Amino acid sequence: MLRSVILAASRSSQVERLVATAPYTRDVVRRFVAGAATDDALRATRGLVDDGLAVTLDHLGEDTVTPEQATATRDEYLKLLKMLGGAGLTPAAEVSVKLSALGQMFDEQLAYDNARAICVAADAAGTTVTLDMEDHTTTDSTLEVLGRLRKDFPSTGAVLQAYLRRTESDCRELSSAGSRVRLCKGAYKEPESVAYQSAHEVDKSYVRCMNILMSGDGYPMLATHDPRMIAIGEDRARWFDRGPERFEFQMLYGIRPEEQARLAGEGYTVRTYVPYGDEWYGYLMRRLAERPANLVFFGRALISKK
C-alpha cells in the first residue's frame, strides 16, 4: 500500500510543490541525484570511477511532448558523451536513455532517430548505450527500437522488469551472445493483468529471470539492492561458472554505497546508475517506491533542522 501511495504522489503537482519548497529538500536530492548540470554528472562520475566503480548516466526528463524537447534531450546526451570521452571516463561510463524523453510517445521514428544519434556518439566516445524501460505500454515499442539499434550497435543494452508477467519470455529472447540485459524489479504501478502485485511474487520472478539470463550466452546486469538477490546472484554466477567479467551488479547512486564498494572490492563489476538534471521529482519518487525504507531517510531530512 505504501508503494501505491508514493507512486500516486509522484503524479501530484501539489505534492511536488510541497516537496520542492520544503526545507532541506536540496540535501536529500543531492544524495540521490548528481546535480543539475553536465559538469555535475562528470564530477560524480570521476569520483565513482576513481573508486573502482563503473557508471551509467541518466539525464532526467521523460515528459517530452514536443520535437524540440526531444531534440534538446538528444543534444544533452551528445554533449555528455563528448565530455566523457574527452575526460577519459569511457568505457567505464556509459549512458542510459529513456525513449520517452526522445519523443517515443508521439513519434516513434523520431525517438529512434534520436537514440541512433546517441548511439553514434557513444561509439565515437568508446562506450555504449542502455535503453531504459518504462511502464508496460511502452515495452513492445522499446524492444522494437532496441532491435533496430542493435543491427548497427550490437552492444546496446536492454532493461527488463521482473514484475511484468511477460519478462521471463523476454529474457529468453534476449539471452543470446553479446546481449546486455539489465534486470530490475520495476517501479511503475501496473495492473494485475500484466504485473505481479506482491513483493514475494516479484522476488520469485526476479530469481527465475536471473536464472534464464545467467544460464544464457548474454551479459546479465543484475540491478538490485536486495541483499537476498545479491547473494543469489553470486551463487548463480558460481553455479553457471560465470567469472566477474561475464556479468555485473548495478545499484543506484546514493543507495548502499558500502555494499557497492564491498562487491567491487571482491572483484565484481559494479555499475552505479547516476541521474542528473532538473527533473528530479518523478525519479526520486520512483526510487522511494522501489524501496520504501528510503522514505525514512527522506522524511527525516525534510523535518530535520540539523
Image: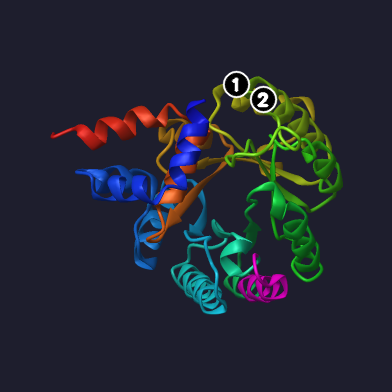
Q: Position of residue 173 (x, y in %)?
A: 86, 47
Q: Are marks 2 and 1 in contact (CB under 8 Å)?
A: yes
Please give left or right for residue 143 compared with residue 67 in the image: right
Residues in magenta, as a range? 105-119
Q: Position of residue 249 (x, y in %)?
A: 60, 39
Please give left or right for residue 38 compared with residue 157 in the image: left
108 w.r.t. 267: above or below: below
48 w.r.t. 230: above or below: below
- Give the residue at mark 2: 203
Q: Quadrant of the C terminus?
A: top left
Please give left or right for residue 161 compared with residue 256 in the image: right
- Give the residue at mark 1: 228
Is 107 a magenta residue? yes
Give me the C-alpha separation between circle 2 and circle 1.
9 Å
Task: Mark yes or no: residue 66 visible.
Answer: yes
Given the current orientation, which residue lies at the most extreme left position?
Answer: 306
Label annotation for residue 28: none
Tag 1, which secondary structure? helix
